[in-house]
Amino acid sequence: MGAVVEVERLVKTYVRGAGPFRAGETVTAVDDVSFAIEEGETFGLVGESGSGKTTTGRCILRLIEPTSGAIRFRGEDVLKFPPVRMRRARRDMQIVFQDPFSSLNPRMRAGQTVEEPLIIHGIGSRAERRERVAELFRLVGLDPAMFDRRPQEFSGGQRQRIGLARALALEPSFVILDEPVSALDMSVQSQVVALLTDLQRKLKLTYLFIAHDLRLVETICSRVAVMYLGKIVEMGTTASLFAAPQHPYTKALLSAIPVPDPDAPLNRIVLDPKSVDRNAPLREITAGHFAAI
């Protein structure tokens, strides 16, 4: 099928503490990251807070500008797009943000939120846009009669459905899901994950699924990359990575997954930072399974 998105040697640095009389300290949030996402797959990007996974996702969409590297969408380098071309590309690449409570404008009604991308891109008449919004509401499991409600009148799960409807308004083929269920109750999480899976099948979507909850990753992702301090330290099929983790950080992450049996022995692995070689390159351990060891 071929790659929809290719990320090559992506770097993002920030300067912290700069002032009139000091140069400041350079902080590398994303450090030489490379991966590809195939057509129709769900590719997981996992790691603890501060590992660089969200920054990577936002660099792909150029919501923040990378320092260096290449990002190709269907073979075209996104970083070379002029503003007009980048605007068109945003119809194909969308994002669902982590927090459904802060990602929606409290002053806008739900229908206006979903309609906004259509207005920005000049799509359809007012009546056609209204019909499209109703269609999107039904697609994500909301009643179109809720069009005029404000975000504060919805539950967290419903708000995330509104955010998803907004992301799908322009009929993208690639969607970044940035911890889309981490702010939701466990019972609601399963409903939203089931919806995401159903929409992927119906609309032939390709997902980048950013998360720290490895149980969800194991359920929804076909391949996974593990990030640690800005670098990818392990990458492979979900089955291979969960069955035979190679990197010390991956082993520590997997050992922290809660088990349903309260009497089961705890086998928590505490990561020793000294056991991680920051300069080790990714190498193929088994077919399609890479680790920086």
Image (cartoon, helix red, strand yellow):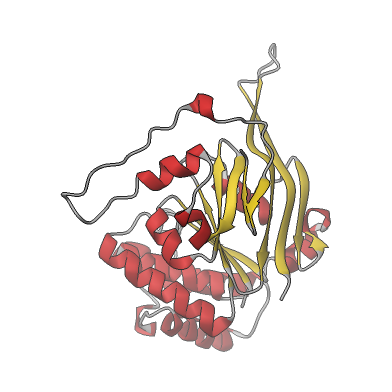
Which one is in front, 282 or 133?
Answer: 282
Image height of 69 relative to 156, above or below:
above
Q: Is residue 242 above or below residue 194?
A: above
Q: Residue at x 37, y 64 (%)?
A: 151
Q: Quadrant of residue 27?
A: top right
Q: Quadrant of residue 291?
A: top right
Q: Is residue 137 left or right of residue 34?
A: left
> Residue 61, image x and y in percent?
66, 57
Q: Position of residue 141 (x, y in %)?
A: 38, 80
Q: Is residue 51 visible?
A: yes
Residue drawn at x 46%, y 67% as measured from the top left: 220
**Quarter of the figure that contains the N terminus:** bottom right
Q: What residue appears at the point 67 percent right and 31 percent down from the top-left corner? A: 279
Residue lying furthest front: 286
Residue drawn at x 42%, y 84% is 138
Closer to us: 21 or 224: 224
Location of the C terminus (image quadrant): top right
Q: Residue furthest left?
A: 263
> Along the horizontal axis of the image, is 282 left or right of 46?
right
Q: Is residue 155 above or below residue 33?
A: below
Front in this rendered view, residue 35 or 250: 250
Q: Position of residue 16 (x, y in %)?
A: 61, 25
